[in-house]
Image (tube, coloured by chain):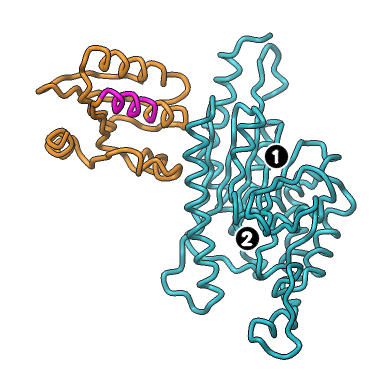
Amino acid sequence: MEIRKTKLNQIVTLNLKGRLDIHNYNQFQQQVNELVANQENQILVDFSDLENISTAGLRSLLSAVNHVNSRKGTLVLCSMEKKVKQSFDRVGFTRLFRIYAGKEEALTQAFRRA
Amino acid sequence: MQDSKNLHLPRISVVLGSGGLRPIASIALFDFLLQENIAIDLLLGCSGGSIFASMYNMGYQPDEMKKITKEFLVAEGFSNFDYRALLSIAKMPGGRFDLSRGLLKNDQALETCQAVFKDKRLEDLPIEMKLQTTDIQTGEGFLLEKGSLAEAVYASAAMYPLLAPIYMEDRWLVDGAFSEPLPITEAIVGKTDIIIAMIFNEQIMPNPRNFLDGFYNINRIYTEALTKSQLAMAVNLHHYEIIIISPAFTKPFSYADPSNIDELIEIGREAVLEQKDEILAAIQSYSNNTPTN
């Protein structure tokens, strides 16, 4: 998996490419931990290039959002492909995250409220 | 796959959820595991899932499981009404209710279980197996891990009030789907690394034709809600991967029509095929990355 980081107006976007699973969930968690440690806790995770996510990947996302929430930050998700969305739905995770259809929608709605 | 040397093998559990006869689709999973020579360390079943987990653990091959299902479960059906129980609902003379009764007498279903599972005991099976039931007096989930296999399978699938409870382990037990339709928590407690969970949820019928359809709809609704809650917790608690196989049952399947069996298995096969690479990758990844002792 590749993680591309960009920052605009205090909002960090992490674009995940490939698949998030047992092989690389640490890499994602470490990235989020570093952001939070640097007070960069307005985070958008863009799934548009993510092909698949396993349960280890889902677990790491939950851990990341809990970590960010504990620091009064915001972590939201956007642009999920159908297969990835199904993985969230299947385990009842959809209601645990704020998920937006597209990046623009997330940027204008999620962080405006935060 | 597990014959390879120098591999640290994961402990693998297979969890089969409830779903009437839809869990017959698990034959496709057992087919795949046999083909790939993937051994199961812990088998967990609930309701219909218990029936097929138990058949597999008895040593029945997938083809035999299919044949048995056609001959016994479908052909005999469930039509042995307890008229005293029915009369009691209408408060008619001769009606009788007590904790041991269901709307159907349990003799026929128990005989069917005994014919399939003979005098086997849970604790004597080659693969460690636990079957989910519900204690009807306390509402607690209860896992059977010893005792008559036939009675345990009956208990796990006894959809009260249609089917009567059965007394085992000092409890009146009914269908495990009322408490844990997917007993995945036990796979975590049982320290398995890779959990293969097969769920058999079905879409609800928006326009039920009768009260029985409505009753099944309610079952579908709470089963799906409970399953999602259990999966959410399991994903959060587990230390490795859970592979979820969810066949797409896009229409209701009758319990009594043997012609459904092949279609159900085929739907299961498609779902297994979708997750096949995930299962193999998880095993390979575990074996490659875990140091041998």
Query: What amino acid type should be assigned to the residue bearing mark 2?
Result: Gly
Residue at 61 percent of width and 55 percent of height = B177
- Whole-percent x, y for residue A32 in the image: 30, 19
- Name the residue carrying label 2: B20
Q: Residue furthest right?
A: B119
- For residue A52, side relative to residue B282 (left or right): left
In this picture, which residue range is highlighted in magenta? A62-71
Residue at 64 percent of width and 38 percent of height = B14
- Name the residue carrying label 1: B43
Chain for numbered disc 1: B
* The hue in which chain A appears in the rendered picture of the protein: orange
The reply to whether callout 2 and callout 1 are in contact (CB within 8 Å) is no
Residue A73 seen from this side: yes
Query: What amino acid type should be assigned to the residue bearing mark 1?
Result: Leu
In this view, the residue in front, B216 or B36, is B216
Please tell me whether residue B97 is drawn above or below residue A49 in the rendered image. below
Closer to the chain start, of discs 2 and 1, is 2
How many residues crowd mark 2 within 10 Å: few (<14), some (14–19), many (20+)? many
- For residue B179, side relative to residue B118 (left or right): left
Q: CA distance from mark 2 to mark 1?
A: 18 Å
Chain for numbered disc 2: B
Residue B123 figure quarter: top right
- Whole-percent x, y for residue B13 in the image: 65, 34
- Whole-percent x, y for residue B135 in the image: 69, 55
Residue at 52 percent of width and 66 percent of height = B252
Residue at 50 percent of width and 66 percent of height = B217
